[in-house]
Image (spheres, grey):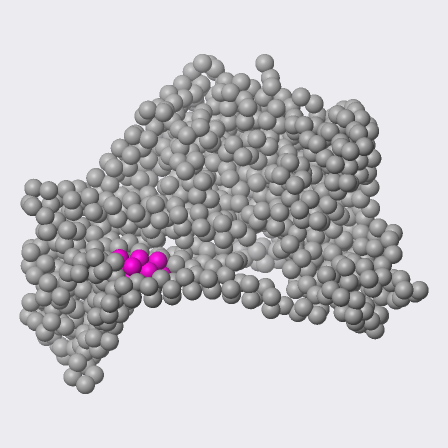
Amino acid sequence: MSDPLISLILGFIIVSALMAFFFPDKGLLAIWRRSAKDSKKEALEDALKHVYDCEYNSLSCTIRSIAGHLHTNMDKAAEVSARLESMGLITSNNQKLYLTDEGRSYALRIIRVHRLWEHYLADHSSVKETEWHSEAEIVEHTMTIEEADSLAAKMGNPLIDPHGDPIPTAGLELPELGGVHLNELEKGDIGRIIHLEDEPQAVFSQLIAMGLHNGMQIHIIDKRTDRIIFEANGEENILAPTLAANITVKKIEDQSEILDDFTPLSSLQVGETGIVKGISRALRGQQRRRLMDLGVVPGSKITPELVSRAGNPVAYRIRGASVALRKQHSDLIFVEKGE
Amino acid sequence: MDKNNTDKTEKLLATAQNLRWQVGENFHESLMESIYSDAARIADRAVKVDDVKKKYDWDVKIDKLVTSRTFGFPLMFLLLAAVFWITVEGANVPSGLLASLLVDFLHPVLKDFMLSFSPEWVAGFLIDGAYLSMAWVIAVMLPPMAIFFPVFTLLEDFGYLPRVAFNMDNLFRRAGAHGKQALTMSMGFGCNAAGVVATRVIDSPRERLIAIITNNFSLCNGRWPTQILIASIFIGAALPAHIAGLVSAGAVVFIAVLGILLSLVVSYGLSKTILKGEASAFSLELPPYRPPKIWQTLYTSLIDRTIFVLWRAIVFAIPAGMAIWLSANVMIDGTSIAEHFISWSNPMGLLLGLNGVILLAYIIAIPANEIVIPTVLMLTVLTAGNPELGAGTGVMFELESQSAMAEIFRMGGWTALTGINLMLFSLLHNPCSTTIYTIYKETGSVKWSVIATVLPLIMGLVVCFFTAQLWMLFAN
Amino acid sequence: MNPSPENCANCPVHNMGNLKKLGVDMSDYDYVIALAGNPNTGKSTVFNNLTGLRQHTGNWPGKTVTRAEGGFIYSDKKFKIVDLPGTYSLLSTSTDEEVARDFILFGQPDVTVIVVDATRIERNLNLVLQVLEITDRAVLCVNLIDEARRHNIIVDIRTLGKDLGIPVVATAARQREGMDELLKSIEEVASGKYTCNPYRLSKVNPGIRKAVERIQNEIKEQFPDLPNPRWVAMRLLEGDQSIIDAIKSGELGDLKAEKQIHQPETIQN
């Protein structure tokens, strides 16, 4: 029989080594599989996407900007752009790079896959919203357009991605988004968020941390040169104008559309009655539909009926039935307090 | 379809696509709102509540009680404990009767009958192997399940179980799971295969998978007897008589509670790692209480759950019985396959604080945990070279007296560590093949079936290894 | 099945081809009945009562996962009954709802029996109104009427029937109460003795009504015999791929085929 101490140490080492290798997402195997991708193809596609972004934002692209975008040196960037040009995807003129028609549709295909995948993650998985973009950055290079099309069909051909960007159609058309940046609104304006820019990641995470999401109504309280103060969901938020430019809003002119004075369902006490005004856009996918199927739609009367032993969940009487909701969801359902 | 028509369809689809951009994402919402406002109007005209005050009087009272701060949890534990008590107490006598009928009486009769016209190996293979394992599974499994499932189903039909899920949801939510998992877990204490089937009530894909994969951590009906036997032989016996019973019962409860804790921990881990790609949607409707239809419930739960699960278990037990018999009777170089395997795997078994016999028993008795102990006993007397202590080569058996069984275990070189690790391993190993098959049927996925099978096995091997080595380190 | 055009008041309307595709074998049966309803409304008990099968039914949402089938004979006709998964709605992307939705739309069952919980009618009407958008051959089974009585809830069956335009039967399936009447109503609708005039959504939200109407009109133009153009229009606006595929393949046009028989104008052809 071997010495137990040595066995213990050996066992410990083996278990840790196996864990380090096989651990989901963070293990060496997962990292290796993620890195075993076609880095050449990826660089080409990323560069192409960059040229497309330039065109979309009416900027001009150069080899230098590609180098910056790909975090690489000028030589590599020149190589990439030469390859793209030889593939007939871009043309250059006077140091500036332009998309060919073929290049544009190639780029739109990548964008379609990317945004569909983000939609998939948001509505059909439990992946956190801060990870949607980075996951889609990987999938966009590996998923074929046919796979993406059948995924879209399964999801009911969604129109916009969770950040509010339109998803290019199967025919590779990209509809206009519209709206203005948050820093273009004036004091007293009311608008609805229609898009949150997901790059750079740090800024996006900050916006998410503030509880902002698409469909949310915001009200500009004060606007100065160095900061914008606005109210969203009953909370006051302060943003620097440069960060505010990452938020696109649609100004609400029609007074009837303005939701005022709503309270989250979770704040109702047993015996109080509320009328459902809306469900926050942060509740997505199956969960949102399930709530609506159960009768949580605007106009429904809703009454907390029974509190569970631990205080969460709470059962509500909705449309004649008793349905238990968790606080994380009832926080995102807005009601108007009744009598 | 002619060209003209194709153009028209294309145009129709294009119109639809354009209009979708105009109505935007709110279409579904607006539609649901319209439907519900019509529904409210129709319901208003057709449904009258006679006396508002009396409406849910009785229901409200029960609801207040079951969710009360003081009585909620005690009531729940009391009811569950009562269900288990009824099961254990009620199953004892019929189990004994079935065993004496099928094993003690019918087995020799059938064997003699077979021997009268067929060679010994045929009789051994069919009767000692196939028949005996089937008889064993029926005797041990049928009575408790025939009691547990109907009683559980009565609570379910009454509408109490959704309230348990409601009360327990807070705990399970923290583990990334659904409150209804409390019920599929409880069902797993009866039978894991039935627990896996019961996860159908969880309508959120991610939480359902979590409940399926972790159901095996509920100590099932087939494992309780193993736990009780080993605890009283190896833990109880080492203590003075007046506390022995209490401590060994405590050890069994400890294992069961450990299983519950591990299922919560594993649920948490799964929800954060491999299952985060699955969609999740929580909803829990609390149906009105309904007086259960007792006879109907008894009938359907017997047919639906008990017979269903028992049938699957029998189908798997018969070939296993054959394999067990063959392993002990087919000789290579004068020794049986079983002995070859045992002597080969013994060092690894000892490293895990178990032994080769236990490892082999868990491999060939995979169809049902019920036959693990009989197989272990049979293999132990076989390897110790005293088959006359048992019922014959390759014939599973159990003994009336606990001390006689303890004697056999000691003869096989078992120590207290072997006992403790067997208890741990009985909790933490792959689900029985009936359950694995059920998991495959329910998920339709090889991937999840493999994960549900391998995950607890790896955990068991790791836990046993470290327990054994630590034990040896401190015992020396 | 080849019904003669002049005798069509009582010939079946189900879509043979599609039923076969959906995995329903109709040889030896005259009519096919679909059983729809919210989870936990006693749908399976109704199914068991009609067919004599014993499927476990619990006080739980979501028991029937796989589709169950059975059969029964009533007034010399053989009925095949298909128990659809219990769903709260037919509008979502979940598999259960897809199964139920496609069966009612493409299978064109001769009768769709919708089982509702008498104590929770308002919530259940959501599904009823959706089913009535798809098919005009339905029977409403207001089950658990005994429970409603116990809770002093009075369901005015006649008003409900008048408002919905379909036969409404109060049942307590666990006590076998009202089952005969349910069978009779099923037979009457299946054989065409009773003509339903189902309720259709009255006030679609102004925001979406225009869009629905525009597509509806285009669909009517292309598929003049389609019994449910508004439903198809609404599904198109939800981006439902099975509808898009059915339009592309022309399958949607087939849905009129048997239905046509009931339209006087086709007899004139």
Query: How many discs appear?
Result: 0
Q: Foreground residue, A215 or B222?
A: A215
Q: Give the range drawn in magenta.
A: B458-468
B470 on left or right of A63:
left
For image coordinates 68% across by 53% down, the residue present is A116
Tell me if I can see residue B402 in this picture: yes
- Residue A230 in percent (x, y) is at 72, 29
Q: Foreground residue, B90 or A85?
A: A85
- Residue B142 in percent (x, y) is at 23, 51
For image coordinates 82% across by 62% down, the residue present is A64
Residue A50 vertical position relative to residue B126 in the rendered view, above or below:
above
- Residue C85 in percent (x, y) is at 51, 46
Magenta span contains residue B456: no
C151 on left or right of B278:
left
For image coordinates 65% across by 26% down, the residue present is A234
Residue B23 vertical position relative to residue B211 in the rendered view, above or below:
above
Q: Is the magenta stretch mostly helix, strand or loop?
A: helix
For image coordinates 10% across by 63% down, the residue present is B410
Residue A236 vertical position relative to residue A202 in the rendered view, above or below:
above
Q: Write down the quadrant of residue B426 in the picture.
A: bottom left
Magenta span contains residue B461: yes
Q: Foreground residue, B79 or A332?
A: A332
